[in-house]
């Protein structure tokens, strides 16, 4: 660590931030079921040919890694909880993460559900220097999602990505070593930082390429610098050779490309057996509508049009849509319209798939008057059967609003109509009382800043690592990479 300086000032040129959630799927499972906090957790295919998607740190201590066959993981860690995964839930946490990131800048490029690049060059006036932004993001993710992440800051995407990796906890023979959480690599040190990594760290270098390079004694990125452009192009082909050589010299001009907002949000379900019973179909449509509405809420969007899709046993597909008088993210409204549309479609043959989609999306983060309108009239006159909006409508809407709030906080399956008998709501541990720490300007020099609820450090029970007291990363540190002896 160094002290003082301007490595992290707004003009430092360190404009790329990379954030990656720690053992994402496994961490979400621990978050939703505190009984898992002390157990190794493995998420992935649980069948005979399944592979591990995500392993908690306790499972990693036992040698479990992602992409490993689940059968091997079971042998290495028989006490682990092996879970099949709940992708809707991960998507919903991912959407909540996205809205934290886009609060900082619209220049967010998601690369996976749990990982994104940010270009923060336009965010300094509002959010401070890059390292303060990085540390603030980590704090917000912990406070608002109850999950840990690693954040890297650098001049380029490659450096930021490697920095976030360096910020992760380390699994060693002695157990889990907490990581720094945030790592900032000053521009002057980036070549030394990148050079120490194995060649596999470069995008485009897979196991086969690494093996080929290894045969010529090239194992670290720094070794590549000693090889001429021509030799590398002969070895790897013109395109990959040039790319690898450029990256190894720190020449990474890849911009952060913000993705376009979604145009629609949908959920479909294919049944094991065709369904003929309309009330059974209605239950599935309602459940799909609630998931879709929940994703709208998580993504802070409202939708104007609801579409229901029905695929019959003979694979013929029919859809029906309705546009609402005011856009909504309410599960009750979307479900009401979707079930009405299903009744209008009145499928007579067996149904193999139903889907609900909403479109006409708009920013839902601004205050709306939708609830008032709802109390006054049905969202769409023809959406509900006659009499459906008689006495008691306002109570139902109020209940629906509370149900929506519960789903927002605890996930799409947390509450449902009693008639639909959905599984019980997952419990969730209380969020730690995080205390934002202000980043003093002098701390935003090479050595870093912020992050860190003291309560969290005392209570390692909260968090995906399943770590107890003394194991949780010291969140108040942001580490500045400083070249010196030893590895990354
Ligand atoms: N994932 C997957 N299959 C893989 C790798 C990942 O389904 N082969 C999923 C599960 C992960 C999530 O994507 O939880 C994020 O991938 P990461 O590589 O970031 O892995 P983790 O977040 O689990 O671990 P880490 O703490 O190393 O980031
Ligand atoms: Mg991750």
Image: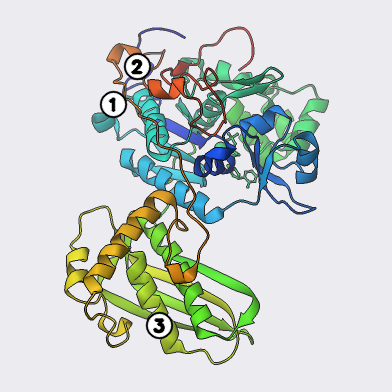
Residue picked out by circle 3: 341
Residue 319 located left or right of residue 486: left
Q: Nearer the viewer, mark 3 or mark 1?
A: 3
Whole-percent x and y of residue 310?
A: 52, 81
Q: Nearer the viewer, residue 3 or 91?
A: 91
Tell me if residue 174 can be seen: yes
- Circle 2: is it few (<14), some (14-19), or many (20+) Cα within 10 Å? many
Q: Nearer the viewer, residue 362 or 210?
A: 362
Whole-percent x and y of residue 382?
A: 29, 85
Q: Quadrant of residue 168?
A: top right
Whole-percent x and y of residue 412?
A: 45, 57
Q: Which mark is residue 444?
A: 2
Q: Quadrant of residue 236?
A: top right
Whether tag 1 and tag 2 are in contact, CB under 8 A, the answer is yes
Q: Is residue 462 above or below residue 48?
A: above
User: SS for tag 1?
Assistant: loop
Residue picked out by circle 1: 128
Whether tag 3 and tag 1 are in contact, CB under 8 A, the answer is no
Of labels 3 and 1, earlier in sequence is 1
Q: Nearer the viewer, mark 2 or mark 3?
A: 3
- Circle 1: is it few (<14), some (14-19), or many (20+) Cα within 10 Å? some
Q: CA distance from mark 3 to mark 1?
A: 50 Å
Residue in view at x 22 percent, y 70 percent: 394
Of labels 1 and 2, earlier in sequence is 1
- How many numbered callouts? 3
User: SS for tag 2?
Assistant: helix
Tell me if residue 452 can be seen: no
Residue in view at x 31 percent, y 77 percent: 323
């Amino acid at each position: 660590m160094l002290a003082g300086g301007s490595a992290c000032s707004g003009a430092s040129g360190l404009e790329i931030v990379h954030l990656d959630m720690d053992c994402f799927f496994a961490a979400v499972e621990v978050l939703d079921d505190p009984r898992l906090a002390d157990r190794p957790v493995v998420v992935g295919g649980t069948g005979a040919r399944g592979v591990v998607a995500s392993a908690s740190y306790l499972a990693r201590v036992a040698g479990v890694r992602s992409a490993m066959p689940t059968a091997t993981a079971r042998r290495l860690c028989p006490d682990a909880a092996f879970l099949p995964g709940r992708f809707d839930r991960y998507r919903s946490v991912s959407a909540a993460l996205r809205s934290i990131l886009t609060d900082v800048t619209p220049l967010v490029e998601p690369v996976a559900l749990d990982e994104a690049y940010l270009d923060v060059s336009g965010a300094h006036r509002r959010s401070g220097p890059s390292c303060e932004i990085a540390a603030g993001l980590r704090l917000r993710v912990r406070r608002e999602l109850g999950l840990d992440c690693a954040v890297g800051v650098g001049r380029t995407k490659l450096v930021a990505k490697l920095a976030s990796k360096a910020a992760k906890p380390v699994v060693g023979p002695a157990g889990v070593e907490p990581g720094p959480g945030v790592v900032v690599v000053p521009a002057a040190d980036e070549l030394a930082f990148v050079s120490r990594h194995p060649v596999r760290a470069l995008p485009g270098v897979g196991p086969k390429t690494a093996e080929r390079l290894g045969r010529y004694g090239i194992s670290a990125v720094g070794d590549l610098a000693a090889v001429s452009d021509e030799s590398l192009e002969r070895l790897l082909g013109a395109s990959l050779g040039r790319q690898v050589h450029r990256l190894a010299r720190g020449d990474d001009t890849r911009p952060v490309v913000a993705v376009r907002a979604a145009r629609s949000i949908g959920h479909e379900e294919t049944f094991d057996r065709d369904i003929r019973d309309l009330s059974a179909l209605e239950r599935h449509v309602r459940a799909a509508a609630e998931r879709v509405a929940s994703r709208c809420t998580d993504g802070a969007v409202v939708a104007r049009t609801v579409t229901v899709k029905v695929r019959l046993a003979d694979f013929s597909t029919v859809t029906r849509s309705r546009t609402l008088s005011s856009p909504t993210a309410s599960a009750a409204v979307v479900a009401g319209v979707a079930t009405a549309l299903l009744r209008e479609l009145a499928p007579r043959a067996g149904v193999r798939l139903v889907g609900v989609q909403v479109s006409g999306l708009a920013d839902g983060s601004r205050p709306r008057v939708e609830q008032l309108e709802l109390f006054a009239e049905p969202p769409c006159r023809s959406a509900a059967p006659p009499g459906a909006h008689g006495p008691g409508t306002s109570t139902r809407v109020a209940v629906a609003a509370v149900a929506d709030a519960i789903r927002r906080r605890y996930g799409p399956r947390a509450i449902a109509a009693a008639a639909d008998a959905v599984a019980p709501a997952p419990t969730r541990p209380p969020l730690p009382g995080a205390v934002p720490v202000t980043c003093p300007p002098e701390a935003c020099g090479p050595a870093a800043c912020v992050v860190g609820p003291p309560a969290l450090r005392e209570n390692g029970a909260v968090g995906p690592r399943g770590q107890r007291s003394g194991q949780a990363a010291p969140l108040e540190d942001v580490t500045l990479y400083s070249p010196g002896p030893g590895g990354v």
